[in-house]
Image (spheres, helix red, strand yellow):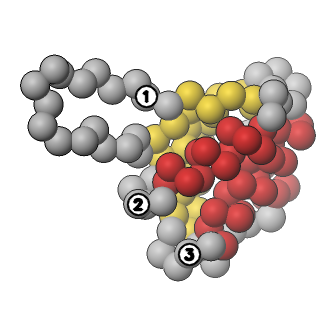
């Protein structure tokens, strides 16, 4: 499988939990890129956590890790949602409405 880039975004307060879990699940089969904010020296408030990350998937197994992490994250809380994008393909996934792995792969990688 050629490397594939997928953007994952969410406004959920627990989104950081998702991408930290995903980075561990990929374990060398992919990479999670997070924005690196520039913090001015006179800043008086904390920098907000990112609302989107870019994920590089390098193998079929890494797509499986993405799917399992999406399912696990959405299964742990009502009202959670994620948007996955690859090129023009865009899939919104909500808690309780997670498609099966084959369907999600087909929607993102037609």
Looking at the rendered image, the quarter that the N terminus falls into is: top right
Residue 103 placement, left or right of 46: right
Task: Name the residue that disc number 3 marks.
Answer: 77
Which of pointers 3 and 1 lies earlier in the amino acid sequence? 1
3D distance between C-alphas at marks 2 and 3: 11 Å
Looking at the rendered image, the quarter that the C terminus falls into is: top right
The residue at 68%/45% (across/down) is: 22
The residue at 76%/22% (across/down) is: 3
Q: Nearer the viewer, residue 32 or 2?
A: 32
> Dots 2 and 3: beta carbons under 8 Å?
no
> Dots 3 and 1: beta carbons under 8 Å?
no
Which of pointers 2 and 3 lies earlier in the amino acid sequence? 2
- Answer above or below: position of 46 versus 32: below
The residue at 80%/34% (across/down) is: 27
Q: Position of residue 26 (x, y in %)?
A: 78, 38
- Answer above or below: position of 79 versus 87: below
Q: Position of residue 89 (x, y in %)?
A: 59, 42
Q: Nearer the viewer, residue 10 or 99?
A: 10
Q: Nearer the viewer, residue 36 or 4?
A: 36
3D distance between C-alphas at marks 3 and 1: 25 Å
Task: Name the residue that disc number 1 marks.
Answer: 35
């Amino acid at each position: 499988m050629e490397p594939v880039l997928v953007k994952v975004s969410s406004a959920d307060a627990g989104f950081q939990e998702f991408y930290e879990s995903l980075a561990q699940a990929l374990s060398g089969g992919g990479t999670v890129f997070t924005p690196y904010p520039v913090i001015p020296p006179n800043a008086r408030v904390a920098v907000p956590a990112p609302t989107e990350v870019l994920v590089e998937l390098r193998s079929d197994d890494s797509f499986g890790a993405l799917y399992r992490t999406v399912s696990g994250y959405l299964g742990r809380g009502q009202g959670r949602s994620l948007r996955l994008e690859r090129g023009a393909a865009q899939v919104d996934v909500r808690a309780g409405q997670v498609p099966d792995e084959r369907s999600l792969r087909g929607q993102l990688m037609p």
